[in-house]
Amino acid sequence: MEKANHDTNKKFDVCIIGAGIAGATMAANLAKTGKEIVIVERNLSERDVIIGELLQPGGVQRLQEMGFESFLDNIDAQPVYGYDIIFEEKDFHIPYPNKNGEPAGYGFRNGAFLQNIRKHILAQNNITVIEGRVTELNEKENLIIGVSYLPKGAAKEEKLQADLTIVTDGPMSKFREELSNPVKKVNGHFLGLLLKNCELPYPNHGHMFMGNHPPFVIYPVTSDAWRILIDFKGEQAPKLGHDFKKFLLETFAGHIPQSARASFVDAVDEGNFKMFPNHRLPAAPIKKVGAVLLGDSLNMRHPLTGGGMTAVFADVKNLGENLATVKEFSDKKAVSKAVQKYYDTRHLGTQATNILADGLYGVVYNPNLRRAFFEYVSRGGKYSEETISILAGLNMDKKLLLNHFIGLARYGTKLKLKSAVNPLKKGDGAMKMMKTATKSGETVAGTLNMVKDALLIITPLLLTEKPDAATKLMLKTLSRKPE
Ligand SMILES: Cc1cc2nc3c(=O)[nH]c(=O)nc-3n(C[C@H](O)[C@H](O)[C@H](O)COP(=O)(O)OP(=O)(O)OC[C@H]3O[C@@H](n4cnc5c(N)ncnc54)[C@H](O)[C@@H]3O)c2cc1C
């Protein structure tokens, strides 16, 4: 990919920092309005990463709506039709909804997908693509007026002027501090490996494994390879030494389906380990005229549910639609209004994805709740269909998500109480009842903790996603009787 020539005195309508998933798609989207755009990317060559390799159907739908479905062409992308959920020795298959012609999801190598988007923007006359590293946001009288950057291979910095700077410098963003109040948390790390030439129980499906082991997901990324991502909880990444390899081969490998185990062992032996931190970053933008945050620099959720790019494309579409209403980008007031509207409304397209991602992450690490989750979705019907529609990014109904979240905790509690070995006798007092041991040795009070645990997981997530109506709803939901 080549760097485009550009006139150094030119003032652009928009400058974008980072031609990653968000920045490159945003450039493509804005270019449709005829605006003059410059995008600066520190490395235009194809990247070999483990992030962003399963695009949920909702993300595909957003691409279609923007006219960018062709980004998925000619990269050996694999259609994904749903999930198999594996819990201990059991599994349950949940197809994505496609009753109304909703698209499938797609698995692909992130680098190949991104190069497709970059090829598209390089072909647009009104997009200037520069390979270089942005070093600074330039400010004048409380207004962002462009950026300074170091062109690739150059010793001297250059400047770019633009009416609006869109910051999309990704998960390790250097500039988010200037444009938001970020409270970033590392929940754990994903180890990524490629499983080559093997089968999994469901071809063209995602597989999510949960049980008494690190949770992991496997999905197809090319016609002959599957991506496996294994979660290691905690702020520190595990050390990739001899002991770690031994753990993977001798303890963990037993959880991989037999049909893929040899490929897993080969991948571990090959040792091409890639590890990436999994963040939670609620969006907390601050108003600054002339700049806006987009993508992982603004908002991140756990990648267990593969929702990141779906959220990004919802934001790209939203911001694009709002900016399309601005005639002249030199009209600061109009641009600020469009940016504010994007910040005020973006939760409608992202909050369900965000809450589900971090909520499910909490569930898979709680032995009672993950069992309850499995039993709940295994009931089929609305219990699996509505849950998968939210995971797919096709259903953004936060109320529905909350109902299911609390519903699964209640259902799990009910199942546990039912299986209690010591049925309560008439006349037992409340205290005695709470202390009565169940079959598994837990107390009834212990099993009731499931609802409390679910609330502990979901409440902080609600409080960071436009909380008022949702909190009310949660309380209302809780006052209902168990199903
Ligand atoms: C382990 C992991 C797995 C994931 N898996 C999935 C998945 O399966 N499905 C899914 O939908 N989402 C997934 N995600 C999330 C998804 O990858 C992100 O949401 C998405 O990539 C965000 O796009 P972005 O453009 O903000 O960041 P990026 O795609 O990372 O792009 C940022 C760009 O900015 C450039 N840049 C940075 N600093 C500068 C600078 N100073 N100057 C110039 N350029 C700069 C970078 O080189 C890069 O090209 C995953 C995330 C993780 C951590």
Image: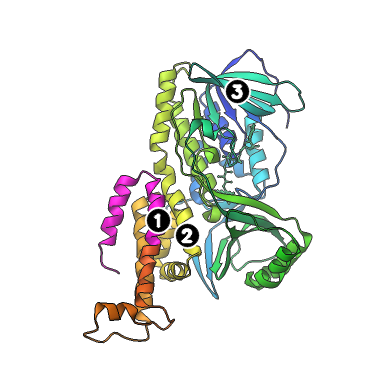
Q: Is residue 127 left or right of residue 95?
A: right
| x and y percentages locating residue 12 in the rendered image | 57, 18
The residue identified by callout 3 is 147
Label 2, label 1: how far apart the Cα atoms are:
9 Å
Residue situated furthest left in the rendering: 427
Q: Report the magenta residues as a range.
A: 454-483
Q: Does residue 382 show up?
A: no
| Residue count near mark 2 (Cα–Cα under 10 Å), binned few <14, some 14–19, many ≥20 | some
Q: Nearer the viewer, residue 353 or 286?
A: 286
Q: Please tell me in which quarter of the rendered image ligand 1 is found.
A: top right
| Callout 1 amino acid | Ile
Q: Are marks 2 and 1 in contact (CB under 8 Å)?
A: yes
User: In percent of the image, x 53 and y 34: which residue is there?
Assistant: 177
Disc 1 beta carbon < 8 A from ligand 1? no
| Residue count near mark 1 (Cα–Cα under 10 Å), binned few <14, some 14–19, many ≥20 | many
User: Of the residues under marks 1 and 3, which one precedes in the sequence?
Assistant: 3
User: Of the residues under marks 2 and 3, which one precedes in the sequence?
Assistant: 3
Q: Are marks 1 and 3 in contact (CB under 8 Å)?
A: no
The residue identified by callout 2 is 362
Q: Nearer the viewer, residue 459 or 331?
A: 459
User: In percent of the image, x 29 and y 80: which residue is there?
Assistant: 433
| Callout 2 amino acid | Gly
Label 2, label 3: how far apart the Cα atoms are:
39 Å
Instruction: Give the SS element for disc 2.
Output: helix
User: In percent of the image, x 61 and y 25: which residue is there?
Assistant: 136
